[in-house]
Amino acid sequence: MSIAVNYHAGQENIASACVPCAGRIVRVEVFDDLGAAEPLWRALAPDAWATPYQRFDLLAAWHRHVGTRKGIVPFIVIGFDGGGRPLFLWPFGRKQTGPLSLAGFLGSKHASFNIGLWRRDLAAAISEADIRNLMAQSAAGRVPIDLFTLYDQPLRWDGLANPFALLPRQLSAEDGSCLTLDHPAGGIEAAVSPAMRSRLRIKERKLKKLDGYGYVQATSAADIDRTLDAFFALKAVHMRAQGLTNVFAEPGVVEFLRRSSHIKLSDGRPLIELHALEGNGEVLAVFGAVVDAYRFSAMFNTYTLSQHARHSPGLILLQHMIGACVARGARSFDIGVGRAHYKSFFCKEPEPLFDTFLPLTPRGRLAAPAFSAAFAAKRMIKSKPALWSAVQFVRRVRAG
């Protein structure tokens, strides 16, 4: 079987090639325009095996407000069957970094779990040779790709192994962790010890004395903007105190998150959900998350800097969120990627992530070991408590 690979600049077909590949894929098209890829993306999405981070609206908003400012051009790879139906979609972006042309998942650090979109039967059957051939041929366009840099990929998702795990890989700089909700031992009882639940009940009783105290999900435009304004203000202070670069102050990020929080999904829920604890007219804690039938996945969070912080509003909010997830039928829950002590109270199931650095040209083969070594070193530092504590101390000192 051969596969025709067509490259689109808007609607213009600028190149084609054929590659051998087993399976039902008969044609592949590569788009550098999100609008042209949108109908196919939406046609595949309802039944696709994917994470909520691969929704069209989320990545289109990210690209419009953030990606374009970083010089990232869409590189959307779509495979079709003989009836013209999409079988997979890889939501990549291409960027020129010095002499290198790099391609990787759209969304950058704002997309915590990347697998692309696949029809489930194809994801279960495709081989390493198939993926290598598809990537090699899709990369051989007018602007050839030197190196694929595919970050933050889970080994498994919703019962299936990640096809990209067939390629050479290494552990990502940080792992995820999750909480399974859809079995008898799941839910908040499995996540938190009785002693911790008791302490949190005592803390919440103190917060309940505040006027208007409660757990809320922002749904109106006014509530969404008010909650986001509080988040951005609090997060800036927290990150400055830790000596960290405020990623939310990077160009376009505020606009991306605000736009995504206002977009409604087909069920009426926001694309990015905002969950908060409030009292005395103050936002005590807030989480932003992307959600689908399988996973509630937190994207960002913060908590108050007032005296009420001592009552652990962030942990109390997490309890309410887990309860809401169980009620809505979600089967898995995570608090984002990375190490933080509070995460271990709730999400005890490790979720290893991996990166792939796949070179396709001599220039890419020279660069790949440097990328691999840099991210391996980052993981090593973060996995050594003494080293990581030293890094955090230096950051705080520099931040004053």
Image (tube, rainbow, N blue to C red):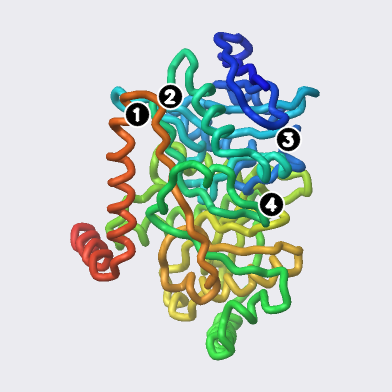
The label number, if any, that marks residue 364 in the structure image: 1
Mark 1 touching mark 4, by CB under 8 A? no
Q: 299 above or below 116?
A: below
> Is 400 in front, or is 13?
13
Picture quadrant of residue 357: top left
Earlier along the polypeptide chain: callout 4 or callout 2? 2
Q: 379 above or below 363?
A: below
- The type of residue carrying mark 2 is Ile
The quadrant of the rendering that contains the C terminus is: bottom left
Q: Residue tagged by mark 2? A: 145
Does dot 2 land on a helix, a strand or a loop?
Answer: loop
- The type of residue carrying mark 3 is Leu
Mark 4 touching mark 3, by CB under 8 A? no
| Closer mark to the observer between disc 2 and disc 3 | 2
The quadrant of the rendering that contains the N terminus is: top right
Q: CA distance from mark 4 to mark 2?
A: 43 Å
Picture coordinates of residue 377, whole percent (x, y): 28, 53
> Is 91 in front, or is 227?
91
Is residue 115 toward the left or the right of residue 70 in the image?
right
Picture coordinates of residue 326, whole percent (x, y): 72, 69
Earlier along the polypeptide chain: callout 2 or callout 3? 3
Mark 2 touching mark 1, by CB under 8 A? yes
Q: CA distance from mark 1 to mark 4?
A: 48 Å
Picture quadrant of residue 365: top left
Q: Please rate how many residues cluster around mark 4, counting C-alpha atoms within 10 Å: few if below 14, some from 14 to 19, many from 20.
A: few
Picture quadrant of residue 192: bottom right
- The type of residue carrying mark 4 is Ser
Q: Is residue 63 visible?
A: yes
Which residue is located at x 62 percent, y 48 percent?
A: 51
